[in-house]
Amino acid sequence: MIVMAGRSDRPTAQRWERRVLAWAWGCTLVALASGLVVVGAQAALFEDRPAAAFDARAIGRMLLETQSGHVWLVRAGFLVLLAAFLSLRMSVERRADWRAARGQAVLLGIAALVPLAAAGHAAAVEPDTARAITLDALHVLGAGIWVGGLVPLALLLRAASTDAGADARPYAVLAARSFSRAALGVILLLVITGTTLAITHVGSVAGLVGTSYGRLLLAKLTLLVLILVLATLNRSVLLGRLGGDGPTIGRPAMRRLGGFVIVEAILALAIIAIVAAMSVTPPARHQPPFWPFSFRLSLAALDGRTVEATRALIGSQVAVIGLVALITGIALRAWRLPLGMVALAFLGAGAGLALPPLAIDAYPTTYLRPSVPYQAGAITAGAALYQASCAPCHGPRGAGDGPAGRNLPRSPADLRAPHTAQHTAGDLFWWISHGIAGSGMPGFETQLDEEQRWELINYLRALSAGYAARGVGATIERDRRWLVAPDFAFTVGPTPARALKDYRGRTVLLVLYALPGSRARMTHIAEREGTLATLGVEVIAVPIDADPQAIRHLGPDPRIMFPVVTEGAETIVATYRMFAVAPHVEFLIDRQGYIRAVTRSGGEAGDLDALMTQVKQLNEEKIATEAAPEEHVH
Amino acid sequence: MRAWKAVLLIDLALIVGVGWGYAFWGLRATRFQRELAEAQAAAASGIERQWVVDGVVRAIFPELGVIVLTHGDIEGYMPAMTMGFRVASPRVQESVAVGDAVRFTLKGVLPNVAVTAIEKIK
């Protein structure tokens, strides 16, 4: 702030400068002292025993072996330097001296503040850790400049508005103006870096309203809006008056501005308290969100509903007109008020038209992510639960045709239907847990534990995916990835277990075979295995009868080198038979883990060149850097 | 002394100090890493080593003296995979057939290793 205000010869200004420096020195000491407390607390946290806070060796380990310890050391070092520097009594009569001394203080301050970014949540962001830390550092720096400037500014305005401080009034006016200018830029920086960081740490609307981190962020934003409103008022009303005629306009304005700046500083302190709470709260992205509303908005609601789709389209266009009007209103000074009114009216009407058709019922668990992965073991476990608890009404194959379901108020849902796109896994979780009122669907919260309910949901997902997979044939559809291959674990003899997931990045030919029918085909594949390997294809053979002696029964001729599953075949077969049933089935799974082609046969030798053509096409596709399929919610 | 000179001096001292410390530490770290790598390489080469690993017999080439095994992790040599190994003597592969779960002994100076013994498990 002092640097922003510049040097002054006026006694009041110099008195103020000394006072701010004393404050800064005090704050540095407080920061150091609180740093000591934090380091003790952290040592206790890492060692998981409170006594470690007073154990020099534990603290030493924390400081030397963890990244937050390193950051603490660097920051503490700079803080000590800063405190020492501020306590030096240097002569700053000359301009160059003054600049050097104050600039040095600012540099040390920045050096002590910015490394904070490397010890926060940003340091745990994967990938792009460096980017997150840089953004966080900029955010912290901006906040430091802005919040740090508020208190000195208030002090200066107070001092200059008294009778005794009249000599510093022009200086204070200039200082307030330059702070106001700088603050505008800093706020812009804070908003940009803050938004980017929020996207990284929160990621979704559900995360924002449904987790404690997101709610803290909302509270922080509310306070920020308050400050910004206050600052805008100050800037537009009071700042212009500062230079006005001393006693009648300038001084009262200055005093009032000083008061408002103090209010801003208090709000900023509240924000910092919230930030402190956020820094010890896990980011929203890593927390299960609880959706607080009874509906959500989704474009999936419009599937196959023409009237509503048209309504939503018209509404969105109306809203766009409103938006254009709003932007024009901001750009044009003269018509601002009427244009703003029109814009708000259009925006409101557009939202009123477009949003209701998009609404879908939602529940607290709607955005909950499955805690059980989409994996063959979970699917088969879910299948058993389904047959016991759900099949009586929903039917043995999920068609909604179970005998017990006939007399219910509403006929049970056909679980194979494609409308699952409208429902998240979290929706299903809610219905299975609590039932559906008035339909006859009971809740299973007391009968099935959480893991079992998720297993059931994984089974339902495989059920509807398998039903949709009926249409998948032996040729791939270019760039159409939608059928996720459920992960599975398997072992070959006494070797360590492997998973399908381990093969991500390579094409997998999953062969479900049965001897003796498949003999010809297996021989053919074994003979061409070298060519397949050159094309980047890994073959995994699974005996449909789950024979633990499968390798022996395939025999020494021809020589088969690819993995033949001897343990885990049962769950793989049970799961993948939901997708295709034939005496011999081959699934072509692409490098990202999607089933792209399914060949059903009797196990005849067939034509391997056709398969090679499909693989070549897969190899020509670009791999998108999207999330792995098991992370998709539905 | 003028204040700006003092500030400049302090900063220079700081930069030199930090730079020297970093360079010193960095040099030591690289030297340490190199020594470690050399020590590891020395430990890995030139000395006869032996592993006992579980696996499955996948194919036998009696005429080549080679047996193909799907095996678990061979520590310090290779991860789990399917791979052909030389056998030390033809007798080694006579006792097993394709599909047998086996425990085999791999012995030799890298990369010249051979299966010296093999026995069925289960």
Image (cartoon, rainbow, N blue to C red):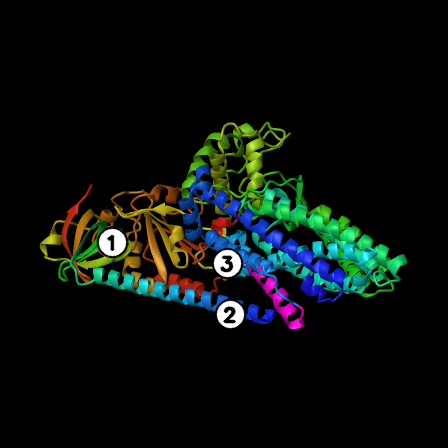
The residue pinned by badge 1 equals: B74
* Circle nearer the N terminus (2, 1): 2
Residue neighbourhood size for the residue with mark 3, other residues' Cα within 10 Å, grouped as few (<14), some (14–19), many (≥20): some
Q: Spatial distance from mark 2 to mark 1, Cα to Cα?
A: 54 Å
Residue range in magenta is A93-115
Question: Residue sitting at 56 percent across and 39 percent down?
Answer: A428
Where's residue A198, x and y in %?
61, 53
Question: Residue sitting at 46 percent across and 69 percent down?
Answer: B16
Magenta part mainly helix, strand or loop?
helix
Label 2 close to label 1 by CB (< 8 Å): no
The disc at residue B12 is: 2
Return the residue found at the far right. Answer: A248
Q: Amino acid at mark 3?
A: Thr
Rendered position, B95 above or below A444 = below
Q: Spatial distance from mark 2 to mark 3, Cα to Cα?
A: 31 Å
Secondary structure found at label 1: loop
Q: Amino acid at mark 2?
A: Leu
Q: Check chain identity for marks 2 and 3: say if they share one.
A: no
Q: Check chain identity for marks 2 and 1: say if they share one.
A: yes
Q: Spatial distance from mark 1 to mark 3, Cα to Cα?
A: 34 Å
The disc at residue A340 is: none
Q: Chain of mark 3?
A: A
**Residue A111 within the segment the image draws in magenta:** yes
The disc at residue A129 is: 3
Q: Amino acid at mark 1?
A: Ile
Viewer-proximal residue among A506 and A363: A363
Q: Nearer the viewer, mark 2 or mark 1?
A: 2
Viewer-proximal residue among A608 and A493: A493
The reply, left or right, for residue A417 in relation to residue B103 is right
The reply, left or right, for residue B64 in relation to residue A315 is left
